[in-house]
Image (tube, grey):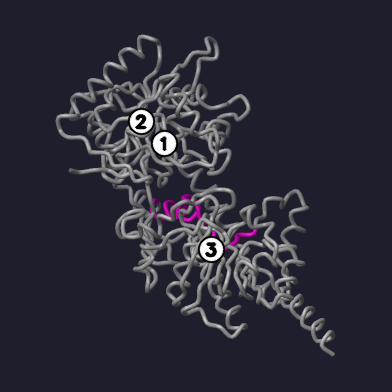
Amino acid sequence: MDVSVSPEGEKFELPKEEDYAREYERLRSIAKEEREKGREIVVVMGLGFVGAVMAAVVADTVDPGSGKPSKYVIGMQRPSPRSFWKIPLLNRGLSPVKAEDPEVAPMIERCVKDKKTLTATYTYDALKLADLLIVDVQCDFLKQELGNLRSGHADISALETSFKVIGEKIRPECLVLIETTVPPGTTEYVAYPLIKKGFKKRGIKEEPLIAHSFERVMPGREYVKSVRDFWRVCSGINEESTEKVTRFLSEVINVDQYPLTVLERPIESETCKIVENSYRATILAFLNEWSLFAETNGVDLIKVVNAIKMRPTHSNIIFPGPGIGGYCLPKDGGLGLWAYRHLLGFDNEIFRITPEAININDTRALHAAQLVRDAMRNMGRIVAASQITVLGASYREGVGDTRYSGSEIIVRKLTEMGAEVKAHDPYVEHWWELEKQDTYPAAGTSWKRFFRNQEHLSEFRMTHDLADALKDSDAIVFAVRHSEYLNLDPDEVVKMAGDRVAIVDCFGIFEDWKIERYFELGCEVKGLGRGHINRIKDRVRKRKLGEES
């Protein structure tokens, strides 16, 4: 029996061939009934991190005049062993994605159980019923080497398959809204020809209606707001597509407070997402060299950055920590490089800053591992056979999203060097990149392939009690600025560890008095961009010498 297993371990039998006709009849009956109520049928293709919440936001939409629901949403997910479990869970009113935002779970439950404006399915035939189809199918950039973006490539195979199916299924009046972040040119040079070819096979002479409007989802406690209450950019391949996407987004998104920007061509909308994320990645990478400068010249870059931020024009300068992480910034610039060569057909190398910024960000965490090594050497210890605790597995504070986190590189590099690593994070139940490294995020794509000695990390489990995580540690890496770590007292940390430890601050977590106290307790302290630490160390050493004399 083929099954799909949820993250909680519940097993769901995959649908059999005879189930599909019955499932389509269920959906057809629902769509007929909902259209009679005057509701638009919206199908969301892909119930992942973005699609599941977008489906709920659309299903929660009401007509401003009557206050009644104006959309009925069918969430469609491919029935693979990896992801089929999302469908029965959502149909129970349970969110298939874990979110820190307290609005996500109640909204999904409300739309499924109370409003009855949301259901999920596994059959592609649902596309036949759509008045509007939102595509939230994954598009990834696969890196072949760590620190060499140019050797990687965009993986648009899932999108291409989806566009072929769409061309075979949808009605000609259905608008296809691509929400996925894609290589610039995808809507016009990939989606349009494939859907048009499907129309031609079916004898449909009308032009496909296709638009692009990228998501700006932000993990955390304002996840829903980043979908519903945030600025959007859109564009259609023709006038009718543009009119339809503008109308739809104006009904679903809070455009009164966050006006919609309509661009002339989809390639402009696609480029917009790539450029804004590449810009962000570049700003963060820029500070890496100054972080290294600070460490070797007695400068505390955290204080420098805070001083600069007082100037309004520079208020968005951010200390990068041990890499940037998240799903978008580490890869989106690569989609632009790939599109320029493979979709748009240019051979000349115009991109210098964008790929180098991503290379810097991808490898910054390696320096954090080196600081662990150096701190331990100063204590007469080595990394091999030592127990090292990493505090923070997610890519940023206040969230449980571990995708491409700098902490993963730290763990893998320390493991390669022979350390036994434990990790604690108040927001992370399972670190799938480690626990399922042979299959997650997909077979053969794990970062484990860039390091040696990684096989046993499949047995890795998060340590959920902080005291247990710190017990008997030889070194502690403060990798994420979770609020739970900001107020930790040095005396308490050393007490939980059981002895003096090597301490590494990756994110400007410690105030100077804490650094000083760690030295007083016999610990060794290092920090990314914190070159002033040696001054504090000297001050403590001189004070101790004075006391001894």
* SS of the residue under disc 2: strand
- Quick check: 274 above or below 521? above
Q: Which residue is mark 2?
A: 75
Q: Amino acid at mark 1?
A: Gly
Q: Hey, which quadrant is residue 301 in on the image?
A: bottom right
Marks 2/1 in contact by CB < 8 Å: the verdict is yes
Residue 210 appears in the figure: no
Q: x and y percent of residue 13 in the render?
A: 23, 38
Seen from the viewer's position, the closer of residues 258 and 365 is 365
Q: Amino acid at mark 2?
A: Gly
Does 325 lie within the magenta span? yes
Q: Amino acid at mark 3?
A: Ala
Q: Residue furthest left?
A: 18
Magenta stretch mostly in which secondary structure?
loop
Judge from the rendering whether residue 49 lies leftward or rightward of residue 170; answer left or right. Answer: right
Does 537 lie within the magenta span? no
Mark 3 vs mark 1, foreground winner is: 3
Q: Where does the magenta region start and end?
A: 319-339
Q: x and y percent of residue 292 in the render?
A: 63, 72
Quadrant containing the C terminus is bottom right
Q: x and y percent of residue 320 in the render?
A: 60, 60
Q: Which residue is mark 1?
A: 51
Name the residue located 48 percent from the left edge and 61 percent from the top edge: 355
Quadrant containing the N terminus is top left
Marks 3/1 in contact by CB < 8 Å: the verdict is no
Name the residue located 77 percent from the left edge and 58 percent from the top edge: 307
* SS of the residue under disc 1: helix
- Quick check: 380 above or below 215? below
Name the residue located 50 percent from the left edge and 64 percent from the top edge: 356
Give neighbour class at mark 1: few <14, some 14-19, many 20+ (Cα, 10 Å).
many
* SS of the residue under disc 3: helix
